[in-house]
Image (tube, coloured by chain):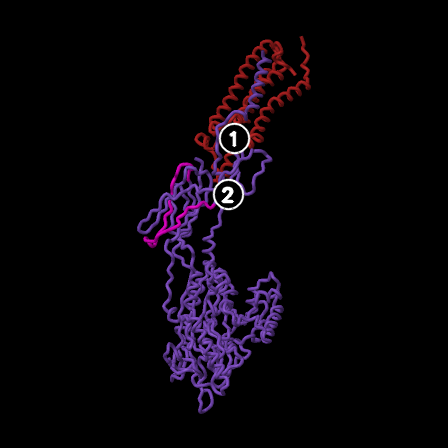
Chain colours: A purple, B red
């Protein structure tokens, strides 16, 4: 009996051991509170920090050294002497004895405004260090832009007196002459200050090679005659976005701002370049100056018009009786300067410049003919040049930033039954259709919104299960919750559908409330959500009035007329010993007379800024965004087990 | 009549000791295997909050707050396993002491027939007490812990209560097979090793 009882007891125990796993158990889900909240990169914070942490000022001063800037006539043979007691070259940086152009004072002011910072002067003229030329010397993988900046460097941390060396009464071999020996300043520079000190000697050799080739007549390493290559584009293409860049540019050197590809597609050259370099994408600002400066020189080209006889604009005050020069008679012209850099640096730097421009006595002196010595024809009228002073206008172009409400905007609030406002984490139970709200201030209650969207960027949810065994292989980066004999594997990934919807968007006088509802199908886990909305109205750029005043445009018809008249001058005037009276300055006053059967055309508007409106428009186009964001708010939702 | 002094048989004592060791180690091994080897792969993450259940009845030391829920769950699990093990060990120890008490009480060889009857009665009472002790400890474990486990399966019962069944069995085996020397087994009920 006892043996029988014992046998039965052992049998029951054996059955229990065998049947433990066979009998059904109540299904239980793992507690998702065991999961660690994923960490996501905060892109808005990174962008905000890039402005918050202001780097020390490093200034690159790109000096236009084109032939128009220096007022240099590229035609070797001409009815005008390159240097005489009356006719001079020099351009904006002319020099007559102790008198120089106001441009030098502008340069000294630009240098002074950056005092205490690392300043680099770069020469940007008609010469080109092409990609093929550099790749041949330094290899295909070299950083060509960095090498180009080193080779264009004229001076580092210069004294103000450096600018006096750029001007000269005779422009042969000067800073502004084509293929000038002054191209190569590397031997005078400390190699340790360059971006590529290891290549110092190699860069010197390359520059010398370039100078030799240009002086021997090889124009392949220049931009002469190229309509889509001029110093402004060259500087923009090679500027260092990490520095504050100031680019001076003679508007006459800007040949074309638009081009047409072989398939007929139009391209905005400057807008495309700014977009390609990511100037506005990097959060940089573009400040634009238009200076009114004095000029004495001979323009052998103006925009994309090329002249066989240069346009004389300003000359020395020549006393015919005494046979000598007694002063200067400069004419006004407009000079462009772009200031590109971090918005705060641009604002601070230009504020310092503007203060000097307003207060310095140097910029208040009168320039130009005082007795009506110089005239020119414009719109059929004779314009007698009057004395003028320095002037400037300035505008700053930034990427539009209407109030974008992000998770860093203080006044945006996230409200829910259980919410951690500091970490922007809403906690709710899955499957119950709970709601929560995002409230943001709306400065303009009338502003219409478009593209309102709530999207799940990422989710940490249950993907699959594994048996809870010692040799279970768990995917990398997955989070695992063991429960009884099962491993529940949670992995991150973009969900197929966002389990949240925007139930409503309510507007009050000064707030906008987005009510977000969790759908019944919400699975337990973490969700990284992005709430976005754009302003429906696009930004309307306001054009400064001075843009219209200073800008000018002309047709190919006019260009053809000017070039034809210039050829006529070459044909009939070069045989003469002296310059005819009408051509002693510009093309003389307005007249109805004919010149060898051809009417005298209006003089090209060299005092104006051709294509200024197009330039400003293209910079604004590059700054534009396809979308004008209103809300870019990211937050997390933690869905617990129901 | 002068009786010769009883000869101590050391081999018998050694056999008794081995019998005690085998019988009483088995419940320990069972419980240890359950908590150490079975629990992580069959009962993972099922530990109830024993601290919350005991705190109204006992003044427990304050535990430092865990940084994450996972850490808190690990602490809770560790506490539960420790409490379950200690509770079982206490029951096991009491059962062992009970059996040894019965053994020591019935060592006297005089008036052996009356003492044998008394020993048998005490044995039956002791077995009742052992079963009651195991049942009480198991009931307390269920009340304060096991009943709060969500989704219980047979593995829970096997791991947490199997050992409590083996304890009275161990008492019974050692009482039957390693009987005191003065008890002569009637019908072989008590064996002397």
What residue would you read off at disc 2? A492
Which residue shows up at 46% across the image and 56% down it?
Answer: A49
Which residue shows up at 60% across the image and 74% down it?
Answer: A212
Instruction: Report the span colored magenta.
Output: A428-457
Q: Give whichever of B50, A191 is nearer the camera.
A: A191
Quarter the C terminus of chain A occupies: top left
Q: Is residue A319 visible?
A: yes
Q: Position of residue B9 (x, y in %)?
A: 68, 17
Callout 1 environment at 10 Å: few (<14), some (14 to 19), or many (20+)?
A: some
In the rendered view, tell whether residue A294 sits above or below residue A5.
below
Q: Position of residue A229 (x, y in %)?
A: 51, 68
Q: Chain of mark 1?
A: B
Q: Position of residue A393 (x, y in %)?
A: 39, 70
Taking the view exactly as shown, the residue that stands out farthest to the front is A597
Going by the image, does B11 lie left or right of A258? right
Q: Secondary structure at mark 1?
A: helix
What residue would you read off at disc 1? B83
Q: Secondary structure at mark 2?
A: strand
In the rendered view, tell whether residue A467 sits above or below residue A388.
above
Q: Which labelled disc corresponds to residue A178? A: none
Distance between the Cα atoms at labels 1 and 2? 37 Å
């Amino acid at each position: 009996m006892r043996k029988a009882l014992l046998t039965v007891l052992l049998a029951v125990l054996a059955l229990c051991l065998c049947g433990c796993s066979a009998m059904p158990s109540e299904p239980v889900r793992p507690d998702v509170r065991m999961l660690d909240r994923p960490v996501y990169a905060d892109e808005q914070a990174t962008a905000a920090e890039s402005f918050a942490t202001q780097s020390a000022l490093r200034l690159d001063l790109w000096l236009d050294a084109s032939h128009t800037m220096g007022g240099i006539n590229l035609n070797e043979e001409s009815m005008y002497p390159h240097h005489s007691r009356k006719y001079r070259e020099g351009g904006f940086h002319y020099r007559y004895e102790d008198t120089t152009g106001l441009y030098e004072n502008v340069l000294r002011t630009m240098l002074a405004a950056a005092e205490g910072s690392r300043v680099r002067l770069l020469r940007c003229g008609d010469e080109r260090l092409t990609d093929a030329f550099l790749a041949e010397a330094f290899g295909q993988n070299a950083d060509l832009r960095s090498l180009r900046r080193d080779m264009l460097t004229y001076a580092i941390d210069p004294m103000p007196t450096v600018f006096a060396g750029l001007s000269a009464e005779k422009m042969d071999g000067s800073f502004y002459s084509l293929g000038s020996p002054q191209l190569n300043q590397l031997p005078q520079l400390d190699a340790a200050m360059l971006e590529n000190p290891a290549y110092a000697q190699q860069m010197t050799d390359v520059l010398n090679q370039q100078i030799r080739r240009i002086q021997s007549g090889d124009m392949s390493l220049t931009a002469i005659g190229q309509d889509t290559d001029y110093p402004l584009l060259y500087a923009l293409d090679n500027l260092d976005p990490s520095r504050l860049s100031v680019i001076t540019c003679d508007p006459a050197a800007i040949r074309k701002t638009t081009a047409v590809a072989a398939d007929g597609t139009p391209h905005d050259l400057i807008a495309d370049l700014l977009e390609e370099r990511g100037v506005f994408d990097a959060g940089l600002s573009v400040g634009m100056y238009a200076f009114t400066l004095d000029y004495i020189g001979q323009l052998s080209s103006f925009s994309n018009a090329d002249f066989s006889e240069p346009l004389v604009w300003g000359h020395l005050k020549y006393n015919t009786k005494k046979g000598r020069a007694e002063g200067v008679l400069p004419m006004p012209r407009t000079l462009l300067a772009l200031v590109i850099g971090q918005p705060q640096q641009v604002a601070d730097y230009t504020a310092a410049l503007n203060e000097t421009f307003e207060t310095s006595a140097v910029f208040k002196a009168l320039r130009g003919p005082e007795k009506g010595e110089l005239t020119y024809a414009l719109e059929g009228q004779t314009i007698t040049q009057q004395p003028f002073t320095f002037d400037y206008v300035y505008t700053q172009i930034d990427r539009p930033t209407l109030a974008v409400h992000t998770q860093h905007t203080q006044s945006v609030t996230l409200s829910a039954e259980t919410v951690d406002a500091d970490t922007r984490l809403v906690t709710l139970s899955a499957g119950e259709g709970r709601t929560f709200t995002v409230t943001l201030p709306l400065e303009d209650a009338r502003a219409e919104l478009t593209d309102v969207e709530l999207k799940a960027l990422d989710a940490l949810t249950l993907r699959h299960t594994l048996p809870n065994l010692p040799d279970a292989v768990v995917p990398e980066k997955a989070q695992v919750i063991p429960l009884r004999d099962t491993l529940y594997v949670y992995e991150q990934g973009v969900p197929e559908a966002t389990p949240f919807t925007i139930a409503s968007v309510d507007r009050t006088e000064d707030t906008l409330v987005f009510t977000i509802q969790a759908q019944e199908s919400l699975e337990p886990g973490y969700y990284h959500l992005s709430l976005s909305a754009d302003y429906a109205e696009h930004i309307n750029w306001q054009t400064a009035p001075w843009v219209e005043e200073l800008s000018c445009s002309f047709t190919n018809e006019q260009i053809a007329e000017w070039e034809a008249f210039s050829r006529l001058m070459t044909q009939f005037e070069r045989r003469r010993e002296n310059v005819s009276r009408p051509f002693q300055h510009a093309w003389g006053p307005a007249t109805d007379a004919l010149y060898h059967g051809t009417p005298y055309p209006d003089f090209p508007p060299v005092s104006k800024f051709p294509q200024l409106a197009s330039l400003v428009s293209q910079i604004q186009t590059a700054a534009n965004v396809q979308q004008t964001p209103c809300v870019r708010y990211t937050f997390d939702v933690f869905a617990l087990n129901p | 009549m002068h009786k010769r002094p009883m000869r101590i048989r050391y081999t018998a004592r050694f056999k008794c000791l081995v019998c005690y060791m085998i019988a009483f180690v088995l419940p320990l091994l069972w419980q240890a295997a359950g908590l150490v080897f079975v629990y992580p792969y069959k009962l993972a993450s099922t530990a109830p909050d024993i601290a919350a259940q005991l705190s109204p009845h006992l003044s427990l030391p304050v535990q430092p707050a865990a940084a994450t829920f996972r850490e808190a769950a690990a602490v809770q699990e560790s506490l539960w396993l420790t409490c379950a093990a200690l509770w079982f060990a206490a029951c096991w120890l009491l059962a062992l002491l009970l059996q040894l008490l019965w053994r020591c009480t019935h060592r006297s060889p005089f008036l052996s027939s009356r003492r044998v009857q008394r020993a048998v009665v005490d044995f039956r009472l002791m077995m009742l007490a052992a079963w009651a002790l195991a049942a009480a400890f198991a009931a307390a474990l269920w009340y304060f812990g096991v009943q709060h486990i969500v989704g219980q399966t047979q593995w829970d019962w096997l791991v947490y209560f199997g050992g409590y069944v083996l304890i009275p069995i161990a008492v019974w085996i050692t009482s039957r097979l390693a009987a005191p020397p003065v008890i002569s087994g009637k019908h072989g009920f008590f064996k002397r090793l």
